[in-house]
Image: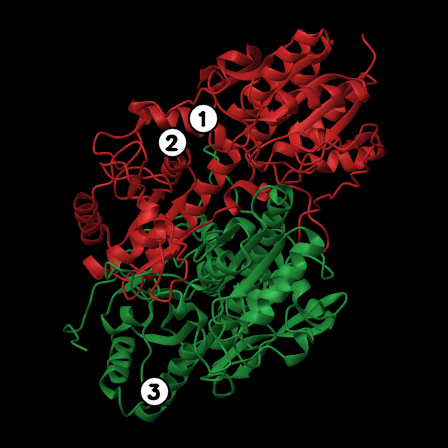
Chain colours: A green, B red
Amino acid sequence: MASGNLLYAQSGGVTAVINATAAAVIGAARARKVKVLAARNGILGVLREELIDTSKESAAAIRALAHTPGGAFGSCRVKLKSLEQDRARYERLLEVFKAHDVRWFLYNGGNDSADTALKVSQLAAEFGYPLTCVGVPKTVDNDLAVTDCCPGFGSAAKYTAVSVRECALDVAAMADTSTKVFVYEAMGRHAGWLAAAAGLAGRGTDEAPHLILFPERPYEEAAFFAQVKATVERVGYCVVVASEGIQTADGRFVADAGGGKDSFGHTQLGGVASYLAGRVKDTLGYKVHWTLPDYLQRSARHLASKTDLAQAQAVGKAAVELALKGRNAVMPVIVRTADAPYRWKIEAAPLDRIANHEKKMPANFIRKDGYGITDAARRYLEPLIRGEAPPPYGRDGIPRYVVLKNVLVKAKLPAFDG
Amino acid sequence: MASGNLLYAQSGGVTAVINATAAAVIGAARARKVKVLAARNGILGVLREELIDTSKESAAAIRALAHTPGGAFGSCRVKLKSLEQDRARYERLLEVFKAHDVRWFLYNGGNDSADTALKVSQLAAEFGYPLTCVGVPKTVDNDLAVTDCCPGFGSAAKYTAVSVRECALDVAAMADTSTKVFVYEAMGRHAGWLAAAAGLAGRGTDEAPHLILFPERPYEEAAFFAQVKATVERVGYCVVVASEGIQTADGRFVADAGGGKDSFGHTQLGGVASYLAGRVKDTLGYKVHWTLPDYLQRSARHLASKTDLAQAQAVGKAAVELALKGRNAVMPVIVRTADAPYRWKIEAAPLDRIANHEKKMPANFIRKDGYGITDAARRYLEPLIRGEAPPPYGRDGIPRYVVLKNVLVKAKLPAFDG
């Protein structure tokens, strides 16, 4: 095996289990006597030469990492442009790699990160620097190509399905004299994967969620109101799950309709759920409540899916193995080999099949009327939320989440201004 | 023991554990061979003579009830007025009790329900009808007098503390390039109990939640902004927990400032978190996110506190025992006998000491600067969120919550129009 260090970085929005991937990466590398550096705040930490020495963390801390949500080394929302446009930054990455003897680069993120990892590998080849770049999948949006599903999605999906089931029981109990319509806003700007997962909370049109609004279908207010009214009259109440990304037929985001400025010129941060709730109240006259779980849905490690956790760990371990074998410009992906009983395995896929692609939800996952999921969707989604993997709790009633020491290695290069 | 039936009803907003109280009531009554009727949708079910025969439910269903959130028989938001003003309705309650041989009435709710139970007991005495009325405590607001805490609060408090810890880890990871301020809106229109519980998520001013806004303290925007700015500059990000009930010094609810109508005349359902987030964004220029958990916080049975669950069951069992002993117009309350180790017991307290009273949060629970909790608050709150009591999960990855058959007994009286 070549000597040198492995650099791991987290990118984009974090998830309930991205740290489980990190723990698996560190564990697998330690077992092979390879030192792992972690970039502070993703790729920014490389540009800034802020590299964390993970060998300063105890084995217990790394074990605890596997049940801690968030991004333990920090993540970032920075997308590098093309090699031509962002040449100086790509070259800086290589300089930092060289300065710290980084021979393996693992970038844990979505489409953009796969693209960055691919470009870095191309530049390294151009410069003749021996570097193996491996992408590691992660995103609650579940929109990565090739892989059957994305680590992080299953736990957010479980959170969504369980939360919708729970609040629906609440609404059912109160509907006679109080709230008749409840709107739950799910993440998903471009694809309705998490909104679809809410469909696992019930079966049939009389069980909550009664109506799901997908970004894949144009939002038509009159038709939606007719469905809400019919549901309230038939069931007594109506639980709506709305994807944050729903749009009208002419391509306007419904969320934007709910925002804007109030009469004092103050910014109104509306969102889809508050907008829909206001319109339903005004038009149909029902008492409404709504929820915007926001980051709670992607950080709820206490409700992680055991399947998702296992996959997050598996891609981390596989990424190290691929890297140490010199498998350049690939990503370990999840391959589903059976629905029932659910079986999956890890394979390597070339980064250029993943970078900048976006997986849409199949059309046959959405019911013909547009307001619910099909059996095909259920077969796909259900295994992903299966199993529980609760974190250990302290005597204080709160999960024992770890905060790492994150000791930086000494910088060797001049500061980079870019 | 007198023959006859026991009538149980749920009132007001439901909780993660009110059904555990119901299960304990039914279990204790069954053990004593007493039949339990349950009112459909709280006191409304009595007025309408819609009484559920719980003997039609299997032992397994009643056991499952103990881990099912919501209100299994339905609840309602109806407050009866004084005996003079609402005479006809109180007399109707007695008629229904007589028609169904109800000798024990257990009303599971908050201040209003205690008041109703008390008035019913007075009217029964006036009419010479042998009835024992027992209140059973429940409310996530934790504002009942006499009892040390209220079943339902501990689980909502645990949800709040755990959720705030989790989303804070998310924000911490993203703050460098993304969200710097996060606002979490907690229930509590009149008292900041749940906002205070969020304080259990961290220790010291550098751990989230960095700032808590209590309804007990006037909201002053400039001072708050200064705290937010100082926190972001010191820590890198700022997690704010705001009680829905915060008011300005002149007594206006901040939530109302965020609502109103947009330029199209549409209702804006703002809430405190979206308003504060918008103001922080406009004034300080930080990227903000916010969450409104709404009903999720009171229905999250998957994250129930074991302490809370035990107390919810204990008050249910005690209520049956008190009723069957003929202890009229009382409520089983929780008495704390020690903080560390935490010990509690159940005692009976007269309903007239509880009805229409409201317990405020002690002034010494709020830090001098107004933005956090004290050690005294921590000593009080921490035992209430201690211990986990997860529901059983199905193969589908979702808790096995039960929906009862809710078979009504045959009505014997003419319909009541009131």
Who is closer to the viewer here, A338 or B408? B408
Who is closer to the viewer here, B1 or B181? B1
The secondary structure type at the circle numbered 3 is: helix
Instruction: Report whether mark 2 lies on the same chain as mark 3.
Output: no
Look at mark 2 in the image and give the residue it sits on: B191
C-alpha distance separating marks 2 and 1: 8 Å
Crowding at dot 2, Cα within 10 Å, few <14 / some 14-19 / many 20+, comes out as many
Discs 3/1, front: 1
Q: Is residue B176 visible?
A: yes
The secondary structure type at the circle numbered 1 is: loop
- Residue type at mark 3: give it: Ala
The secondary structure type at the circle numbered 2 is: loop
In this rendering, would B367 be left or right of A227?
Answer: left
- Residue type at mark 2: give it: Ala
Residue B299 tag number: none
Against B141, residue B263 (above or below) is below
* Residue at x 47%, y 55% (from the top left corner): A293
Where does residue A228 sit, x and y in percent of width and height? 61, 61
Where does residue B199 sit, x and y in percent of width and height? 36, 37
Look at mark 3 in the image and give the residue it sits on: A124
Look at mark 1 in the image and give the residue it sits on: B143
Instruction: Report whether mark 3 lies on the same chain as mark 1.
Output: no
Who is closer to the viewer here, B382 or B84? B84
Q: Which of the two discs, 2 and 1, labels the residue nearer the N terminus? A: 1
- Residue type at mark 1: give it: Asp
Question: Label 2 is found on which chain of the structure?
Answer: B
The answer to which image quadrant residue B116 occupies is top right
Crowding at dot 3, Cα within 10 Å, few <14 / some 14-19 / many 20+, comes out as some
